[in-house]
C-alpha cells in the first residue's frame, strides 16, 4: 500500500481521499473506481492512525503508533521517502496540540519513529521550523502551544538514540532551543528541566562538562531570585555531579556554601513555601529536599524556621507543610525528633481549618491530606525504635497547647486512640500520670498567654474520660491493682471532699458519678452513720442513709442470684445509679428509690404467681386491678426523671428502657404521649413550674393584666392597619404581575411557569410578612423553654420504643398524637427544636416494616385513621403546606400496614377483601377530589408516594389518571401532574415485576383507549399546532410518559407505537421545542426506534374568504385596532393614576416595596407603630410637608374634604368616558390638585381613616376575588 502527496493509485482511491483531507488537496475519483470498490466497504487506512493518536484511551494511542510504525518499516524504499517525511512532519505538528492526549500520542510516536527509522536532526529541525514556529498573528495560547511542541521535540531527541549520535554542536543547539522555549512560560521550566535531569543518567562527567555552562546559567541566581524549578535543577546537578558544584561555586551563585545550612534555612523555606499554582504541590523538589532534611543535622532548626511561615493562615502553605512533614516522617532516622514535627503554628492552623469546615464547605482535599499525614505519623510511631517517652511527647503536642483534648473531635480522626494503642505497660502508666495531673491541675499548660493559667473543667473532664479508657488497654489487662488505684482516685475526687483543697468543678463531679457506679460497694464500706457529716462532700440525713442501706441490700440480693438477665439487670442498673444519685440530688433519688422498691416487689410477686412463666418475664395480668401496673409506675418514674435536665438521668433511661419495651401497654404509652399533648396541663413539670413561679406570679399578675388591656387596644388598631396594608400589598403584587385594573381577572392557566413561580414566591412573602404576630413575638419564658426541652427528652422514649419491634396497634396510636404535636410546634417559632425532633420520630415511624403483633388492627381501624388523616388538612391550608410530607408519610404507612395484614396468613379472608377495597376506595376518592375540587388541599406528594408502592390498589388509580389527562374539565397544571403520576406507575419496576401478565391483562382496555387518545391529540395538534390550551410542559410530560410505558416491564403490545411515532414526528415538524422538550423527544424517539431528526415545515395560517378580498380593508382594520388599543392604554393609565391617588393614603409604607420581585419584602414595625401612635393624618402631613407650600387653599373640615374628593373622582370618571385624547393633561392636573388638597386636611384622624377604608371596600372587591382564587389554587 502506497500513498503520496501528488500521486494517485487506482487501487486505493479512498486512501487518497483521506490523504487529501489532511493536506487540503482536492482529489477527483472516477465513477469506475467508485463502482469497483465502494467507499463503505473499505477498511480503515494508515492515515486513520494519525487521528487515533489523540484518542483519550492509552491503548488506542499505543496501537495506532505501532500500526503507523509498522507500515513505515514494511514499506522502506526510495519511493516511500515522502511517506516518512509526511509522517514526521505530521507528528511534529501534533506536538503543538492544545490537548494533553494529543501531545502524549504524538510524542510516543515520535520517540519510537526516531529510534526505528533513520531520521536525522536536519530533518527534525526542518519540520520543526516549518510546523512549529511562533507568529505575530497567533494568540498567546497558540504561541504557548508552539513552545510546548518545541520542548517535546527536543525531549524526544534527548530520550532517543539520536542524542547519543549527535555531535557537541548539535547537542548545544538542542539545549539552546529547549532552554529558550521553556522561558516563554513559567510552567514550562519544569518540563524542560526534567528532560535535562533525565539525560544525566546517560552522560559521564566528561560529556556533561561540555554542556554544563549552558545549564549553569539557569541556576546561577542568588537566593531571592531562586524558585522551585531552578532549585530542583541545582539539586539534581549537585547530587549527580558533586565535583562540579562545589562550595565555592555555590557561594558565587546562590550566596551560601550549601543548599541546606543554617544560613540558607530562611531563604530555603521561603522558596519552598512559594508556589505559583496548586499543581506545584506535586513538584519533585519537595521529595528531594525533604529526604535530605530527614538525614540533616539542621532538621530541628529547619522546622522552627518553617513554622514561622505558618503564623498566618494560608491554605497553600499549610498543604506544603503537610507534604514536607509527611516525606520527612517516611525517611527520618532520629526518632526522638518526631514531636518536633508537630510545631505550634502547624497544630494551631490545622485545628483552625477544621473548625471552619461547616455545611458544604468541607475542603475534602485538605482533610484527605491531613488524614494521610496522621497515617504516616502513626506508621512512624509504630516503629520499634520509638520509645514510650517519644509517644507521650507526641500526644502532649496534640492534647496540650496549642492542641486540645478534643483534637479527635475537631479533626474527625482517631489519632489519639491509635497512638495510645501502641503504648506498652510502662507507657500506659506514664500517660495515666499525665492525665491525673491534668485532673488535679498539677500538670503545666505551657500556654504562651499565661504561665499560671488553670485547666478548664472541660479539659479535665476529657482527661478523665481518656484515663477511664486506659483501664481497658491491652497492655494493662492483668494489672488489677493498678486499675483499683485509678478508680479509687476518681472516686475520691467525685464523691468525697478533697484533702488538699483542690477544686475540680461541679461539672466534672456530676459526670464522674456516672462513671463510678461500679464502685458503689467500695463507697459503702467507707460510710457509717457516724461519719456522714465529715466524709461526704454533700452530707445526707440518716433517713436517706437508711434508704441507701436498703438499696445496698437489694443490690446484694440481686448479685447473689445466678440468673441476672431480663428485669433483674434493669432493676440492678436502676438501683446502682439512683443509689449514687442520693449524694447528688437527695430528694429526687429518695423518692425514685421508694417507687423502685414497690415496682421491684410487684415484679417478684408476679413471678411467684405466674408459676410456669419465666422468671425474667412477669405476668402482667396478675396484678391488682385497682393498683396500676408496675410498668406504668416505672414509666411515670422515667417521665419524672426526664423532667430534670440531667444528662446522667437521660443516659440512664436510654440504657434501660429498651429492655422494658416488650412490657409496654396502651396505658403506659398513653402516659408518654400525654406529655406531648399541648392541651394537657398535667405533666411532671407542672408542680415544679408552679412551685418556682408562685412567688413571681402574684407580682406579675397585675402587670400582665395591664399589658393584656394595652395589647388588646393596640391589636384592634393594628389589625385594621395590617389588614389594609395586606390588601394593598396583595394588590401591588397582582398589579406588578400585569393586572393593572379591577376589571381584569387572573387566569392562572394562562400564566407561564416562570410567571407562576414569581407570583407564588411574591404571595408567599406577603402572607409571611403579614402573618399574625410576625416580628412581634415575645421571648419564650423560662418555664415554656423548660417544657419544650422536657418534651424533646420524652421523645427519646418514643424513638426507643419504635426501634424495639412495637405492636402495630400501639404504633398507630402513637402516630396521631405526634401529628398533633407537629401542628402545635408549627404555630410557635420557639418550638423549632421540638418540631425537628417530631419530624424525625414520624419519619422513623413511617419507615417501620416489622411489628411484634397485629392484634386489634382491622379494616375499620385503618380506614377510619386514614380518613381522619386526609380530613386533617382540609381545615387549615397553612397546616397542609407545612405538614404535607408528614401527613403523606403517615398515609403511606397505613397503606403498608393494610398490605402487611393482607399478606399474613392468619388474617381472615373477609378482612383481606375489605382491606383491599376500603383503602383503595379512600385513596381513589381522594384522588378524584384533588383533580376536581379547587379547594382540595390534599398533598400531591401523597399520590406520588402511593404510585411508587408495591400495592395492588394503585391499579384502581390508573384509569382515573388516564381520564384526567385528556379531560377538558381538568386544569392544565393538574394534567401535567396526572402525567407525572402515570409515569411513576410505569417506572415502578418493583411492583410491575411481581405479576406482569396479570397487570397487563387488567390494563389492556386502558392501554387501547390511551393509544387512541394520544393519536387523536397529536392529530388535532398537527391540524392546529399553535393551540393556547396545550402547553409545552404538558407535551414534555407526555413524551416522558410514552417513554416510560414503552420501557416498562409489561411489554405492552396493544398500543400503536408506529402510528404514535409518526404522529409525534409530524407534530415536531410544526413546532419548536425548548431544551427539556427536545431531550424528552429524543428519548422517546430512541425507544420507538425512529430518528429524532425532523425536517421543519413552514407555518401556514388559513384565512377566511372575506379576509382575502381586500387588502386595504385589512390594513384599515389593523390601524383601527392599533388606535383603539392605544386609546385603551391611555384610558387605563388615567384610571390607574386616579386609583393610585385614592389609595395613596392607604399605601403608606409600601412605596418602595416590590413584591413581584420577591427579593426583600419587609414591613418596618416602626411605621406601623407610628400610624397607631400619631394617627394616619398626622403621618401624612409630615410626609407631604414639602407639597403643602404649593397648595393655594386648605379645607377646614374633614367632611368638606371628603365631599370634594368624591366629586373630583366622579368628574374624572365622566371626563375619561367622554374624551380619550386631549383631556388627559387637564385630568392629570385636576387629579393632582384634588389629591394635594385632600392631603392638606389638618383635621384627619384615625376615625376618618376607618371611614375611608369602608368607602374603599368596593374598590377592592375584585382584587379580593383574585386573592381568593390564588389561595384556593395553593
Image (tube, helix red, strand yellow):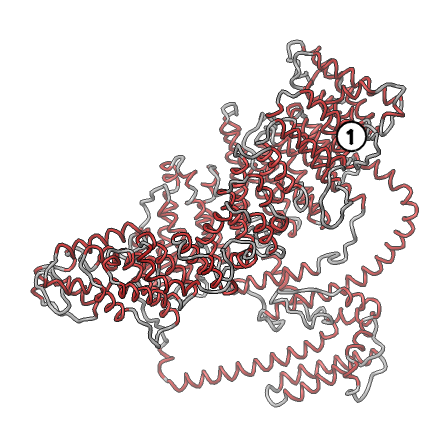
Front residue of this view, candidates 130 and 1246? 130
Residue drawn at x 18%, y 59% as measured from the top left: 118
> In the rendered image, which residue does mark 1 sit on?
494
Image quarter (top left, top right, bottom left or bottom right) of the C terminus: bottom right
Which quarter of the figure has residue 698? top right
Residue 706 is left or right of residue 478, and the answer is right
- Measuring from the top left, give residue 1236's x and y in whole percent: 76, 82
Is residue 330 among what the camera can see?
yes
Number of numbered markers: 1
Which quarter of the figure has residue 566? top right
Front residue of this view, candidates 355 and 672? 355
Image quarter (top left, top right, bottom left or bottom right) of the N terminus: bottom left
Secondary structure beneath dot 1 equals helix
The relative height of residue 924 versus residue 1192 in the rendered view (above or below) is above
Residue 430 is left or right of residue 747, and the answer is right
- Measuring from the top left, give residue 28's x and y in whole percent: 13, 70
Residue drawn at x 61%, y 90% as measured from the top left: 1222
- Measuring from the top left, give residue 239's x and y in whole percent: 41, 52
The residue most toward the front is 248
- Measuring from the top left, give residue 609's x and y in whole percent: 70, 11
Front residue of this view, candidates 684 and 893? 684
Question: Within 10 angstroms of label 1, few (less than 14), some, or many (20 or more) residues?
Answer: many
Amino acid at each position: 500500500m502506497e500513498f503520496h502527496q501528488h500521486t494517485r493509485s487506482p487501487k486505493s482511491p479512498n486512501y487518497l481521499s483521506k490523504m487529501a483531507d489532511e493536506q487540503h488537496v482536492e482529489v477527483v475519483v472516477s465513477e469506475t473506481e467508485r463502482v469497483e470498490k465502494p467507499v463503505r466497504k473499505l477498511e480503515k487506512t494508515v492515515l486513520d492512525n494519525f487521528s487515533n493518536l489523540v484518542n483519550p484511551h492509552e491503548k488506542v494511542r499505543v496501537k495506532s503508533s505501532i500500526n503507523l510504525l509498522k507500515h513505515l518499516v514494511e514499506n522502506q524504499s526510495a519511493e516511500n521517502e515522502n511517506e516518512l517525511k509526511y509522517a514526521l512532519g505530521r507528528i511534529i505538528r501534533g506536538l503543538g496540540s492544545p490537548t494533553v492526549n494529543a501531545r502524549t500520542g504524538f510524542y510516543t510516536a515520535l520517540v519510537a519513529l526516531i529510534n526505528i527509522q533513520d531520521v536525522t536532526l536536519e530533518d527534525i529541525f526542518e519540520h520543526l521550523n516549518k510546523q512549529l514556529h511562533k507568529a505575530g498573528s497567533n494568540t498567546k495560547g497558540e504561541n504557548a502551544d508552539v513552545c510546548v511542541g518545541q520542548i517535546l521535540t527536543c525531549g524526544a531527541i534527548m530520550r532517543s538514540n539520536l542524542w547519543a549520535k549527535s555531535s557537541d554542536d548539535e547537542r548545544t543547539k538542542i539545549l539552546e532551543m529547549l532552554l529558550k522555549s521553556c522561558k516563554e512560560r513559567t510552567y514550562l521550566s519544569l518540563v524542560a528541566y526534567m528532560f535535562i535531569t533525565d539525560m544525566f543518567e546517560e552522560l559521564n562527567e566528561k560529556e556533561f562538562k561540555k554542556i554544563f555552562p549552558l545549564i549553569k546559567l539557569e541556576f546561577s541566581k542568588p537566593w531571592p531570585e531562586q524558585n522551585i524549578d531552578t532549585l530542583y535543577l541545582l539539586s539534581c546537578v549537585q547530587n549527580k555531579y558533586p565535583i562540579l558544584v562545589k562550595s565555592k561555586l555555590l557561594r558565587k551563585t546562590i550566596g551560601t556554601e550549601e543548599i541546606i545550612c543554617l544560613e540558607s534555612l530562611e531563604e530555603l523555606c521561603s522558596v519552598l513555601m512559594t508556589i505559583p499554582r496548586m499543581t506545584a504541590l506535586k513538584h519533585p523538589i519537595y521529595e528531594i529536599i525533604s529526604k535530605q532534611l530527614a538525614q540533616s543535622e539542621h532538621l530541628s532548626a529547619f522546622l522552627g524556621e518553617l513554622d514561622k511561615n505558618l503564623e498566618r493562615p494560608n491554605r497553600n502553605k499549610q498543604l506544603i507543610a503537610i507534604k514536607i512533614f509527611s516525606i520527612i516522617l517516611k525517611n527520618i532516622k532520629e526518632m526522638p525528633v518526631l514531636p518536633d514535627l508537630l510545631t505550634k503554628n502547624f497544630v494551631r492552623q490545622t485545628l483552625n481549618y477544621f473548625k471552619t469546615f461547616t455545611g458544604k464547605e468541607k475542603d475534602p482535599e485538605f482533610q484527605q491530606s491531613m488524614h494521610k499525614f496522621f497515617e504516616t505519623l502513626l506508621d512512624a510511631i509504630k516503629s520499634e525504635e520509638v520509645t514510650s517517652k517519644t509517644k507521650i511527647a507526641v500526644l502532649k503536642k496534640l492534647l496540650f497547647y496549642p492542641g486540645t483534648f478534643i483534637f479527635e473531635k475537631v479533626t474527625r480522626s482517631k489519632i489519639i486512640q491509635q497512638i495510645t494503642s501502641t503504648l506498652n505497660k510502662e507507657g500506659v502508666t506514664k500517660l495515666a500520670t499525665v492525665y491525673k495531673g491534668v485532673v488535679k491541675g498539677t500538670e503545666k499548660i505551657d500556654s504562651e498567654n499565661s504561665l499560671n493559667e488553670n485547666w478548664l473543667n472541660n479539659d479535665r473532664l476529657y482527661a478523665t474520660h481518656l484515663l477511664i479508657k486506659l483501664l481497658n488497654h491491652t497492655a494493662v489487662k492483668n494489672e488489677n491493682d493498678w486499675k483499683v488505684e485509678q478508680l479509687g482516685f476518681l472516686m475520691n475526687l467525685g464523691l468525697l471532699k478533697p484533702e488538699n483543697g483542690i477544686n475540680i468543678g461541679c461539672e466534672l463531679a456530676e459526670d464522674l458519678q456516672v462513671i463510678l457506679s461500679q464502685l458503689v460497694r467500695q463507697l459503702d464500706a467507707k460510710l457509717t452513720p457516724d461519719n456522714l457529716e465529715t466524709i461526704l462532700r454533700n452530707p445526707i440525713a440518716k433517713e436517706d442513709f437508711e434508704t441507701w442501706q436498703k438499696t445496698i441490700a437489694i443490690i446484694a440480693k440481686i448479685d447473689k442470684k445466678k440468673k441476672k438477665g431480663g428485669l433483674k439487670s434493669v432493676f440492678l442498673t436502676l438501683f446502682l445509679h439512683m443509689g449514687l444519685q442520693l449524694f447528688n440530688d437527695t430528694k429526687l433519688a429518695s423518692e425514685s428509690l421508694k417507687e423502685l422498691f414497690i415496682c421491684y416487689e410487684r415484679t417478684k410477686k408476679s413471678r411467684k404467681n405466674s408459676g410456669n412463666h419465666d422468671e425474667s418475664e412477669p405476668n402482667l395480668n396478675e396484678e391488682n386491678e385497682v393498683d396500676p401496673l408496675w410498668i406504668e409506675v416505672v414509666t411515670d418514674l422515667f417521665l419524672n426523671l426526664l423532667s430534670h435536665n440531667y444528662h446522667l438521668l437521660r443516659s440512664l433511661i436510654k440504657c434501660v428502657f429498651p429492655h422494658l419495651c416488650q412490657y409496654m401497654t396502651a396505658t403506659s404509652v398513653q402516659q408518654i404521649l400525654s406529655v406531648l399533648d399541648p392541651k394537657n396541663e398535667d405533666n411532671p413539670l407542672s408542680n415544679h413550674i408552679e412551685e418556682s413561679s408562685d412567688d413571681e406570679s402574684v407580682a406579675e399578675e397585675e402587670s400582665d393584666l395591664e399589658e393584656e388591656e394595652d395589647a388588646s387596644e393596640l391589636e384592634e388598631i393594628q389589625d385594621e392597619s395590617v389588614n389594609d396594608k395586606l390588601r394593598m400589598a396583595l394588590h401591588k403584587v397582582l398589579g406588578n404581575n400585569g393586572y393593572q385594573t379591577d376589571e381584569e381577572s387572573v387566569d392562572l392557566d394562562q400564566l407561564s411557569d416562570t410567571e407562576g413561580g414569581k407570583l407564588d414566591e411574591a404571595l408567599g412573602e406577603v402572607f409571611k410578612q403579614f402573618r399574625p404576630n410576625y416580628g412581634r413575638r415575645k421571648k419564650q419564658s423560662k418555664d415554656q423553654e423548660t417544657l419544650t426541652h422536657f418534651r424533646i427528652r420524652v421523645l427519646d422514649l418514643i424513638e426507643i420504643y419504635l426501634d424495639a419491634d412495637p405492636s402495630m396497634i400501639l404504633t398507630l396510636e402513637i402516630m396521631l398524637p405526634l401529628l398533633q404535636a407537629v401542628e402545635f410546634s408549627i404555630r410557635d417559632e420557639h418550638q423549632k427544636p421540638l418540631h425537628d425532633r417530631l419530624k424525625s420520630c414520624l419519619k422513623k415511624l413511617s419507615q417501620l416494616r416489622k411489628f411484634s403483633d397485629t392484634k386489634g388492627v382491622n379494616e375499620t381501624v385503618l380506614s377510619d385513621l386514614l380518613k381522619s388523616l386526609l380530613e386533617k388538612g382540609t381545615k387549615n391550608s397553612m397546616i397542609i403546606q407545612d405538614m404535607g410530607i408528614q401527613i403523606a408519610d403517615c398515609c403511606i404507612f397505613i397503606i403498608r400496614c393494610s398490605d402487611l395484614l393482607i399478606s399474613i396468613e392468619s388474617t381472615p379472608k373477609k378482612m383481606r377483601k375489605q382491606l383491599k377495597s376500603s383503602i383503595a376506595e379512600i385513596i381513589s376518592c381522594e384522588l378524584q377530589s384533588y383533580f376536581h375540587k379547587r379547594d382540595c388541599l390534599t398533598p400531591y406528594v401523597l399520590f406520588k408516594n402511593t404510585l411508587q408502592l408495591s400495592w395492588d390498589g394503585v391499579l384502581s388509580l390508573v384509569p382515573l389518571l388516564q381520564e384526567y389527562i385528556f379531560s377538558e374539565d381538568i386544569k392544565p397544571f393538574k394534567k401535567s401532574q396526572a402525567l407525572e403520576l402515570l409515569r411513576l406507575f410505569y417506572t415502578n419496576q418493583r411492583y410491575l415485576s411481581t405479576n406482569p401478565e396479570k397487570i397487563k391483562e387488567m390494563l389492556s382496555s386502558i392501554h387501547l383507549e390511551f393509544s387512541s387518545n394520544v393519536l387523536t391529540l397529536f392529530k388535532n395538534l398537527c391540524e392546529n399546532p399553535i393551540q393556547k390550551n396545550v402547553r409545552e410542559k404538558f407535551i414534555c410530560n407526555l413524551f416522558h410518559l410514552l417513554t416510560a410505558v414503552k420501557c416498562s416491564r409489561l411489554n405492552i403490545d396493544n398500543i400503536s407505537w408506529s402510528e404514535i411515532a409518526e404522529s409525534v414526528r409530524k407534530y415536531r415538524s410544526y413546532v419548536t421545542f425548548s431544551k427539556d422538550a427536545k431531550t424528552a423527544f429524543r428519548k422517546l424517539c430512541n425507544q420507538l426506534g425512529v430518528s429524532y431528526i425532523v425536517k421543519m415545515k413552514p407555518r401556514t395560517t388559513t384565512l377566511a374568504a372575506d379576509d382575502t378580498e381586500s387588502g386595504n380593508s385589512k390594513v384599515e382594520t389593523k390601524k383601527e385596532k392599533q388606535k383603539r388599543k392605544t386609546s385603551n392604554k391611555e384610558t387605563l393609565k388615567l384610571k390607574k393614576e386616579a386609583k393610585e391617588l385614592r389609595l395613596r393614603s392607604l399605601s403608606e409604607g409600601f412605596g418602595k416595596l416590590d413584591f413581584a420581585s420577591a427579593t426583600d419584602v419587609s414591613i418596618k414595625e416602626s411605621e406601623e407603630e407610628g400610624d397607631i401612635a400619631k394617627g394616619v393624618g398626622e403621618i401624612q402631613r409630615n410626609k407631604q410637608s414639602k407639597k403643602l407650600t404649593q397648595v393655594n387653599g386648605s379645607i377646614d373640615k374633614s367632611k368638606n374634604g371628603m365631599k370634594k374628593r368624591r366629586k373630583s373622582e366622579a368628574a374624572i370618571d365622566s371626563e375619561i368616558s367622554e374624551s380619550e385624547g386631549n383631556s388627559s393633561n387637564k385630568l392629570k392636573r385636576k387629579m393632582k390638585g384634588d389629591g394635594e388638597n385632600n392631603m392638606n386636611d389638618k383635621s384627619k384622624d384615625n376615625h376618618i381613616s376607618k371611614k375611608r377604608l369602608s368607602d374603599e371596600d368596593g374598590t377592592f372587591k375584585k382584587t379580593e376575588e383574585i386573592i381568593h382564587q390564588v389561595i384556593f389554587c395553593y
